[in-house]
Image: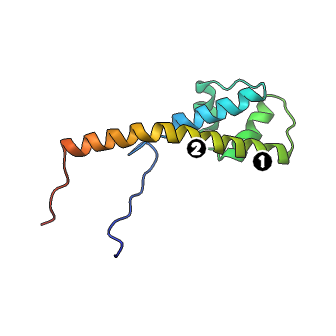
Amino acid sequence: MSLRAIVLDFDGVIANSEPLHFQAFRDVLAEEGVTLTEGDYYARYLGFDDVAAFQAIAVACGGAWTTAHIGELAARKAARLESLECVRGGADRDRIRRARRRDPPRPRS
């Protein structure tokens, strides 16, 4: 079987995962006693990768997290994100299926 298509999803086109990233950061940081608001996440940390976001958050709260601890936080955030995606994934699949039923693919000419 040959490759027939490649789908690229720029976040927010097919699925918007940013709210899930925020939730994962918020949950992991709460375990550290740090509060991350949605406003702060979107205004200050949206363009960062996980490690850079945790580094910037540490600076903002006056913390001195080690590189190893930041790596642990990033790993915990990735695990939390995966668990959120498993729950959310079903809802996104259902939304995509409903959209396909309304506008089925057209045959190629």
Q: For residue 16, say whether it is visible.
A: no
- Position of 87 with respect to 80 (left or right) is left
Per the image, label 1 sits on a secondary structure element best described as helix
Where residue 12 sits in the image (x, y, percent)? 43, 42
Where residue 42 sits in the image (x, y, percent)? 57, 32
Q: How is the image coloured?
A: rainbow
Q: Is residue 102 above or below residue 30?
A: below
- Looking at the image, which residue is at 85% across and 39% down? 65
Q: Is residue 39 above or below residue 69?
A: above
Residue furthest to the bottom: 2
Where residue 1 sits in the image (x, y, percent)? 34, 76
- Looking at the image, which residue is at 73% across and 40% down? 54
Q: Quadrant of the C terminus?
A: bottom left
Q: For residue 63, say whether it is visible.
A: yes
Question: What residue is shown with label 1?
Answer: 71
Question: What residue is shown with label 2?
Answer: 82
Amino acid at the residue labelled 2 = Glu
Amino acid at the residue labelled 1 = Gly
- Looking at the image, which residue is at 42% across and 43% down? 15
Per the image, label 2 sits on a secondary structure element best described as helix
Q: Say whether marks 2 and 1 touch (CB < 8 Å).
A: no
- Looking at the image, which residue is at 77% across and 41% down? 55
In this orientation, which residue lies closer to the viewer: 103 or 1?
1
Give the spatial CA distance, label 2 vs label 1: 17 Å
Where residue 51 sits in the image (x, y, percent)? 72, 46
Q: Mark 2 or 1 closer to N-term?
A: 1
